[in-house]
Amino acid sequence: MFRSPSLTWSCAFAVGGRIRAPPDGRQEARRRRGGPAELPSRQGRGVAVTAGTACDRGARAWFRGFLAASPAPSFRCLRPLLGGPRPMSSSESSSRRDFLQGKAAARALLDQARAWTADPTPEPSERTWTAPSRRGSAAAHARVSVSRRAMACEFSVEFHAVDGKGATSAALAGLDRIDAIESQLTVYRDASEVLDINATAHAAAYRCEPGLYGLLEQSLRLAGATDGAFDITSGPLSRLWGFFQRQPRLPSAEELAEALASVDYRRVQLDPAAQSVRLLDPRTEINFNAIGKGHALDHAAAELESAGIADFLLQGGSSSVLVRGVQRDALTEGWLVGIPHPFDDDSLLGEVRIVDRGLGTAGGGTQFFEVAGRRYGHVLDPRTGWPAEGVLAATAIAPTAAEADALATAFAVMGPGAVAEFCAAHRDYGAVMACPGAGTAPIDVHVFNLTPDQWRPA
């Protein structure tokens, strides 16, 4: 069943190359630091719209609205600071099918974005502020964000409004592709291709769809490169610790030994000629939880690129990002993405400027449970079966979002010493690691393979 996506748009100016947050909320700040915006959407019925100009503290003008659909699908656009509600013209209406697929909302959103940026009505202010920019008018900076839930998180596609309705169609196609990949990879439903592999591939080779076979090849390559710190066969450990059920528990030594006996990526055997997979132990199973979101972002990006869309940002939940081209309101190439502070939701460790790359973040600093005063994080070391220690959060920057996702998990397991060695041997990958501080410093931040113009500490 198609789920109507939520969409937002914003016209934002850069101040020193960084997007500022609106004074009464954290939506844009959350988006820039790798977290999803909190949007006032109605699942399956509505479209959330945010618009504004991010200026300096003395001259911020923000206006908002909610584009809601009535049961009979007619739209109206609310602009509280710009003259109140306005019925949409007949040219903005569409068929019920287009409405259900989110296309009507997308068209209306683009039309409204263009109208507001072409003829903005500023909020009264004591002085006029002019944004520094090298990429043209405010209309060129307006961005549209289309989002939908998948894989237990919010996925979003952010692009520039001037790229037209073709970009919106491509964004919706990208979200459809993410839905299809979730259906293929999930282990939380009654049926999927991965569940078929786990049920049958120990008895006979299972011929894979080409995209899934490529993901298996990529996963095994990354497992070998990280000495098993990333392992797609570690699902039994997550289940044992209760993280699958979101009911964490401390397992016994006997339970842990039994689960560990089924975990080893080297028991997954691939046949390139037949594009098939075999599981060499009947207890072995595969699970793509630590790489699936990034893999989905890579495929969504291919949908936009095939439609000729050059500049966009994709995001999966609060941990996975993929960018292409430029953020047109920034003063530098690429996109600026904030790295969240592991202890303070309102703060950043710093910002990373990335160009045509993926970024992933993992760590147990904020997701953990306690037993007898000891903390146990949700990132498990597949080699020992125990939660990883010594890293609060690890961020990986890689050529693809899938690699970034997988390496973020691996880096959280490996620790800064092993990550330093990995990055020295793989110069195309970068990392930012937050670790418990020594002495009076609460956090030590380790940065690898990022130049001063790529990493800016908070």
Image (spheres, grey):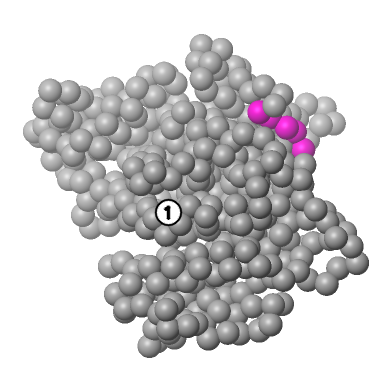
Circle 1 Cα neighbour tier, 10 Å, few/some/many (<14 / 14–19 / ≥20): many
> Does residue 387 appear to the left or right of 186 in the view shown?
right
Image x and y of residue 383, in percent: 42, 26
Q: Nearer the viewer, residue 78 or 386?
A: 78
Residue 363 appears in the rendering:
no
In this picture, is 290 found above or below 136? above
Q: Give coordinates of residue 262: x percent, y percent.
A: 29, 32
Q: Amino acid at mark 1?
A: Ala
> Of all residues shown, which one is farthest toward the left?
204
Q: Quadrant of residue 123?
A: bottom right
Q: Secondary structure at mark 1?
A: helix
Q: Nearer the viewer, residue 308 or 80?
A: 308
**Chain part drawn in magenta:** 454-458
Task: Residue at 42% x, 79% y: name it.
Answer: 91
Identify residue for label 1: 167
Q: Where does residue 361 sit, x and y in percent of width and height?
A: 55, 38
Residue 230 horizontal side relative to residue 98, left or right: right
Please identify the dominant SS of the magenta region: strand
Q: Position of residue 89 (x, y in %)?
A: 47, 83
* Residue at the right extreme of this rendering: 126
Q: Residue at x 36, y 46 (%)?
A: 307
Q: Decide if residue 114 is in sight here.
A: yes
Q: Quadrant of residue 269?
A: top left
Query: For residue 19: magenta?
Result: no
Q: Quadrant of the N terminus?
A: bottom left
Q: Residue at x 44, y 68 (%)?
A: 107
